[in-house]
Amino acid sequence: MVVLFYIGVAGALMTVLQLPLDYFSGFCLEHRFGLSRQSRRDWFVDYLKGIGVASVLSVIGIETVYALLRYQPERWWIYASLMFTGFVVLIANVAPVLLFPLFYKFKPVQSDDLRRRVDRLRRRTNAGVCGVFEWSLGEKTRKANAAVVGWGNTRRILVSDTLLRNFSGEEIEVIMAHELCHHVKGHMWWGILMEAALSFGTFFTINEALRRFTVFRGLADAANFPVIALTGIMLSAALLPVVNGFSRQLEKAADRFAIEVTGDAFAFVSSMEKLADLNLANKSPNKIIEFFFYSHPSVEARIKLAADRVGQLA
């Protein structure tokens, strides 16, 4: 109960302190540049939903960690790492059907042309069944996006309605080929392996920090929570370039796959240009900023990849 109270007070304080920045970046700036279509009320409703989901998951996670600290003080970090990895796998499966619908509407893609293109891509890649759903992103923003989510019976490709409205059939096909690569090459599982390695490293480091710096009654004392939180935050920040670099490599492989499978480098280039224009993305960011903060290659790098592939195939 003490831990739960501690988490509640700390979480509420952090939420209040962070709210002005979240509001400015998530609502004010998005409207200033004509990206958002949400009213202030709708933005706050989504914000509260996000806080609610994050709070529930955080309480479950922290209470589990403290239970392990109490009952398995020597090996708690090993069990915590295994449980966190299992939780990531579970969330990856249920998120498309339980969490995403809290924020967006989805429906199967109705376009016969798009379904034909997807079937053609499946045949070319020997991909298993992977549903394609229209993602109602346009209700909230003019940005366009696509993603592959879920695994097993929830595996699906999401294509935003803004993408369907503003892109040609060839451009959508090459974007879908990119997303299909994540499915065909098992990139989600590579990502989970990365998460597992990071969780073991993070919980091991937290365990070492607790044993070296705690001055309270034991590892499971609620007063040690700042040590756990600060160690986790600092380690996450230090490992951010590694995580983003790994993600960029997967995205680069998916770009190469899309160009090779469709044989349409021109559609790939035009789709990247359109995405950058719609989303107001920086096409040529500073290399240091890209190294630290970009989970995808820059548009400039992606276009260069397409040019290089054309040269190699010529």
Image (spheres, grey):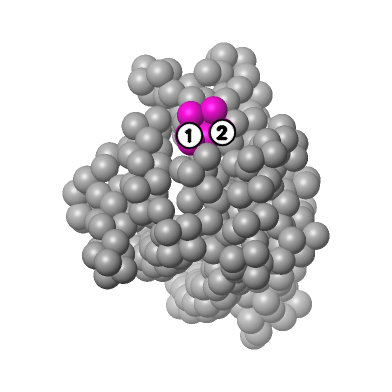
- The C terminus: image quadrant: bottom left
Answer with the quarter of the image where residue 63 lies.
Answer: bottom right
The residue that appears at 69% across and 39% down in the rendered structure is 112
Q: Which residues are magenta?
A: 162-168
The image position of residue 67, as x and y in percent, is: 74, 68
Q: How many marks?
A: 2
What distance separates the C-alpha of mark 1 from that of mark 2?
6 Å
**Residue type at tag 2:** Leu
Dot 1, how many residues are within 10 Å of its Cα: few (below 14), some (14-19), or many (20+)? some
Q: Please tell me whether residue 166 belongs to the stretch shown in magenta.
A: yes
The residue that appears at 46% across and 43% down in the rendered structure is 171
The residue that appears at 68% across and 45% down in the rendered structure is 115
Residue marked by disc 1: 167
Element carrying mark 1: loop
The residue that appears at 76% across and 64% down in the rendered structure is 152
The image position of residue 228, as x and y in percent, is: 53, 63
Q: 55 or 112: nearer the eye?
A: 112
In the rendered structure, find residue 164 and report the number of the disc placed on it: 2
Answer with the quarter of the image where residue 249 lies.
Answer: bottom left
Q: Is residue 304 above or below residue 189?
A: above
